[in-house]
Amino acid sequence: MNAIPPTMTPGALRASFGQAAASATSLKWAALQDAANVVAGLAGLEPERAGPEVRNFPALMRDAALWRRELADRAIDEMAAVMAPGIGALLGVTARGASPRAAALALWREFTQARAAVLALLPPSGSLGPRRST
């Protein structure tokens, strides 16, 4: 008889690849929204309040077709690859005492256009939000 319950075996509590990928996408998406608010502040804009489509994006994509998820993951990675050095450059400009507003506004516009393209990958859904059943 095995003394270790099946739920205690190694890896039993680990997320499957699909769940881990969804979680990583969710974290990246949230980090991008936070970074965008930093850019908005440097551009002299009010921080944006995320609408339901932006807030629920990871949950809505979780059940989307594989091609949509893969395309969204690549786009999110590309957005992060633009935002990280962009924010670094904006902070460098600020540290030198110059105004980052014009450059921050350009980065903000680039981000919002890229985000709109990623949100367009969402599968059509009703007004009830993401599916919550397990």
Image (cartoon, grey):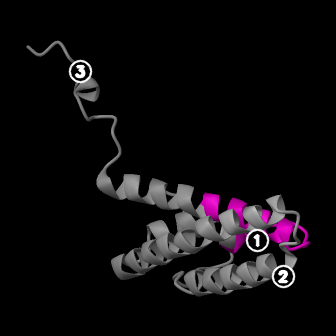
CB within 8 Å, label 2 to label 1: no
Residue appearing at x 17%, y 12% in the figure: 3
Q: Quadrant of the N terminus?
A: top left
- Residue plotted at (27% across, 34% down): 12
Q: Quadrant of residue 38?
A: bottom right
Q: Nearer the viewer, mark 2 or mark 1?
A: 2
Helix, strand or loop at label 1? It is loop
Mark 3 vs mark 2, CA separation in Å:
60 Å
Residue pictured at 82% horizontal, 62% vertical: 96
Is residue 74 a member of the stretch shown in magenta?
no
Q: How far is disc 3 from disc 1 in space, using C-alphas?
A: 44 Å
Residue bearing mark 1: 51
Percent across and percent down for residue 65 are 38, 78
Query: What residue did someone put label 3 on?
Result: 5
From what the image shows, is residue 115 above or below residue 96? below
The magenta stretch is: 30-53
Q: Which badge, 3 or 2, is on the more N-terminal residue?
A: 3
Question: Whole-percent x and y of residue 88?
Answer: 67, 63
Secondary structure of the residue carrying numbered label 2: helix
Q: Which residue is mark 2?
A: 102
The dominant secondary structure in magenta is helix
- Crowd around label 2: few <14 · some 14–19 · many ≥20 (10 Å): few
Q: Residues within 10 Å of mark 3 (few under 14, many from 20)?
A: few
Asked if residue 134 shows in the view, the reply is no
- Toward the front, the furthest residue is 96
Quadrant of image for the C terminus: bottom left
